Amino acid sequence: MRIALDVMGGDFAPKAILEGALLARQAVPTAQVLLVGRQTEIEAHLAALGASKALPIVHADDVIEMADHPTKAFSHKPNSSIAVGFGMLKTGDADAFCSAGNTGAMMVGAMFTLKTIEGILRPAIAGFVPKTDGKVGVMVDVGANADVKPEVMVQFAELGSLYAQHVLGIDTPKVGLMNLGEEEAKGTLLTQAVYQALKINSRLHFAGNLEGRDLFNDKADVIVCDGFTGNVILKMAESIYEIMVDRGLKPDSFFNQFNYEEIGGSPIIGVNGSVVIGHGVSSPKAVCNMIRQSEQLAKSNLHVKVKASLNEYSL
C-alpha cells in the first residue's frame, strides 16, 4: 500500500514528519511511505537522522504555509507538496495521501483534484470518539462545514454509517443526532428537520437524538452534527487529555484516546480517494498513526463503497 506523505506540512515539518515516517517503517510495515517535498531538505534531514536512503522521495518545489489562503495557495502553487501529493493520488501513483499541513488547502485539493463523489453534496471530515465499552465511534462533521442544510447532514449520517461499517467493522451502525435533548421536538429548526429526515431513512439505523452525556456511551456508533458543533466537541475532548497531563494525572486507556497523537488524523469522506488530515502540531508518533490510518482507509476502498451505495439507492 503506497502512502504519499506531505513532508513539508505541519508546525514541526520536515523533521517531525520524517521521524514519524521512519517510525511507520516498523509500526506499519505493509505501507510504503512516499516522501513528498523539497528533496534537498528531506535528504539533509534524513542524513542527520542516519537514514539517508530509507524512503523514496518525490520532489515538490513549493510549500503551502499554514497561514496561506487555501484556494489561492492551491491554485498559485501547483508544485507545492500538497498539490503534488494529490496529483499522485489522482494518477494512481499513491493509494492514499496524508498531510499535517494547511487543512483548508487539503480540503480544496481534495475537491479540486479528486472531485466530490457524484451525488455527495459536501465532503466531510470525520472525527473519532472513544466509547466507555472499549469501542470507537465516528463523528461527522468535525470542521469542514460550519453551516449546513438538513439534506447535507443526512448525507453526513450516511457517510459516517458507511465509514463505521467498512473501516471500523460495525455491521449495523447506530446513528444518533447531537442535540440539546432526547425528545423528538427538541433542538433548532435545523436539527428538528434533520431528525425527521433521519427518522424515515431506511438506509440508516437511527437511534434518535443524543445529548452531550451520550457522546461516550453505546447509544450511537455514528454521531451526526454540523461542522461547527463537531469541531467544538473535538477540541474540547483534546483539551481534557491535556488538562489531565498538566495536572499530573495518568490517563488510562480510555482517556488516552483523547490524545490526538493516538488517532493521527481525520479522514475526508465523500471525495474520490483516500485522504487523511493530521493535526498541525503533529509529533512523530502522530504522523506514524496518521500513516497507519491512511493505510486502513485505503484498504477499505471507502470511496468506492460510497459510490456503490449511492448508485444502489438512486435506481
Image (cartoon, helix red, strand yellow):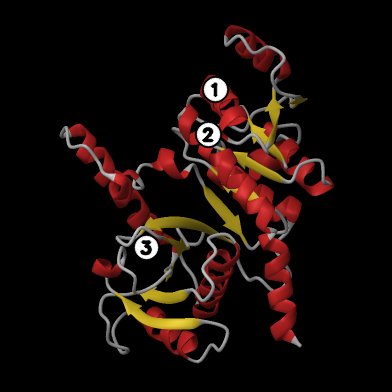
Kindly report which numbered mark, 1 or 3, lies closer to the viewer in this rendering.
1
Question: Residue 287 shows which numbered tag?
Answer: 2
Point out the tag, 2 or 3, that comes first from the N-terminus.
3
Residue 111 in view in this figure: yes
**Element at label 3:** helix
Residue at 68 percent of width and 53 percent of height: 299
Point out the tag, 2 or 1, that comes first from the N-terminus.
1
**Element at label 1:** helix
- In the image: residue 62, left or right of residue 212: right
Looking at numbered disc 2 in the image, what kind of residue is underneath it?
Answer: Val
Kindly report which numbered mark, 2 or 3, lies closer to the viewer in this rendering.
2
- Residue placed under numbered mark 3 in the picture: 229
Residue at 52 percent of width and 41 percent of height: 278
On the image, the x and y values in percent for residue 237 come to 31, 51
- Residue placed under numbered mark 1 in the picture: 19
Question: Residue 104 shows which numbered tag?
Answer: none
Looking at numbered disc 3 in the image, what kind of residue is underneath it?
Answer: Thr
**Element at label 2:** helix
Please name whichever residue, 174 or 7, is drawn nearer the observer in this view of the structure.
174
In the rendered image of this protein, does residue 114 appear above or below residue 105?
Answer: below
On the image, the x and y values in percent for residue 271 come to 68, 59
Residue at 28 percent of width and 69 percent of height: 214
In the rendered image of this protein, does residue 120 appear above or below residue 287?
Answer: below
The Cα–Cα distance between marks 2 and 3, rounded to whole angstroms, is 26 Å
The answer to whether the residue labelled 2 contacts the one labelled 3, judged by CB atoms less than 8 Å apart, is no
The Cα–Cα distance between marks 2 and 1, rounded to whole angstroms, is 8 Å
